[in-house]
Image (spheres, helix red, strand yellow):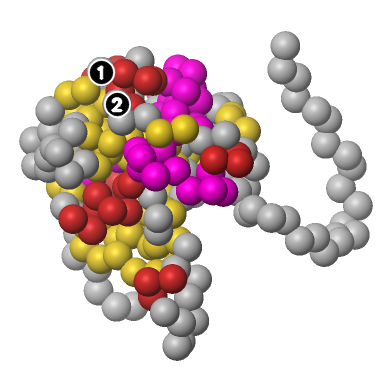
Amino acid sequence: MTTTPSVREHTGQHVTVDPAILYFGTPVVLLSSANEDGTTNLMPMSSVFWLGRSAVLGIGARSQTAANLRRRPELVMNLASPSNVAHVDRLALTTGRPDVSPWKTRAGYVHVPDKFAAAGLTPLSSATVRPQRVAECLVHLEAVVREVRPLGSRPGDDPEAARQLAVEAHVTRVWVDPAIRLVGHPDRIDPDLWRPLVLSFQRFYGLGGQVHPSRLAGIDEDRYREPRTAS
């Protein structure tokens, strides 16, 4: 049984540390992209955030997904929930590239050409892009890539030598399971019903209940559709 460890009393005396990774808690996404033969590759990832209809994703520059997006700049972000965790974990040490890198080989990665079959997931056709959606996920965000650029490079660095890429994508279609829609608002998500799967320092977690009322929630959600003016 997994138990939640108690947090030591806050002392206010912070110390400096040098973590190898900075995954303090981000949503898990199964990222769909189109392989050269037209099939769909799935990559589990959690470096993603959204602003309006734009998404910014961080991916490995030498991944199958990176090669796919350079060739066909379309994708689907299938947002995972805790009920999908076993499927996600089956893909954790897989790669769509047949030439598995030495680093990934040492880490235990293996080449898997059919990620849907490996994870026990069901493909669905998309409406605005070629990559398929994942039926078992409650949220699907179809998107087209606007820009791919090196992440973490400095002026003068060779962009082709980058290890990570920042991908900016524009969402073209949003699909949700009706079970998480807000009653009385057909275009809104009920945050009490939607529970994203979260990755924190390589471990899976879900969300609990709301911890405090939010003043930001006092703004009508539909106001974000209005054009913004400088203030």
Task: Report the Cα–Cα distance between label 1 and label 2.
Answer: 11 Å
The residue sitting at 43% across, 21% down in the picture is 87
Q: Is residue 88 magenta?
A: yes
Q: Where's residue 82, x and y in %?
A: 48, 22
Give the left or right position of residue 168, taking residue 10 as reference. left
Q: Find residue 218 and report its horizontal and vertical position in percent.
A: 41, 46
Pick out the residue farthest to the left.
127
Give, as a single range, the part of the protein colored magenta: 75-104
Q: Which one is in front, 151 or 40?
A: 40
Q: Would you say residue 183 is visible in this rendering? A: no
Q: Quadrant of the C terminus?
A: bottom left
Where residue 106 appears, x then y in whole percent?
60, 41
**Quarter assignment of residue 41:** top left
Tag 1's secondary structure?
loop
Numbered label attached to residue 122:
1
Residue visible at 47% across and 63% down?
A: 163
The amino acid type of the residue labelled 2 equals Asp
The residue indicated by pointer 2 is: 114
Q: In this view, does 228 lie above or below 34?
A: below
Q: How would you rate the neighbour count of disc 1 (Cα within 10 Å): few for under 14, some for 14-19, many for 20 or more?
A: few
Give the mark nearest the N terminus, 1 or 2: 2
How far across and down, in percent of the image, does residue 85 sit?
A: 48, 22
Taking the spot 21% from the left edge, 41% from the top edge, the residue there is: 35
Give the residue furthest to the top: 1
- Identity of the amino acid at label 1? Thr
Dot 2 falls on a residue whose secondary structure is: loop
Q: Residue at x 41, y 38 (%)?
A: 95
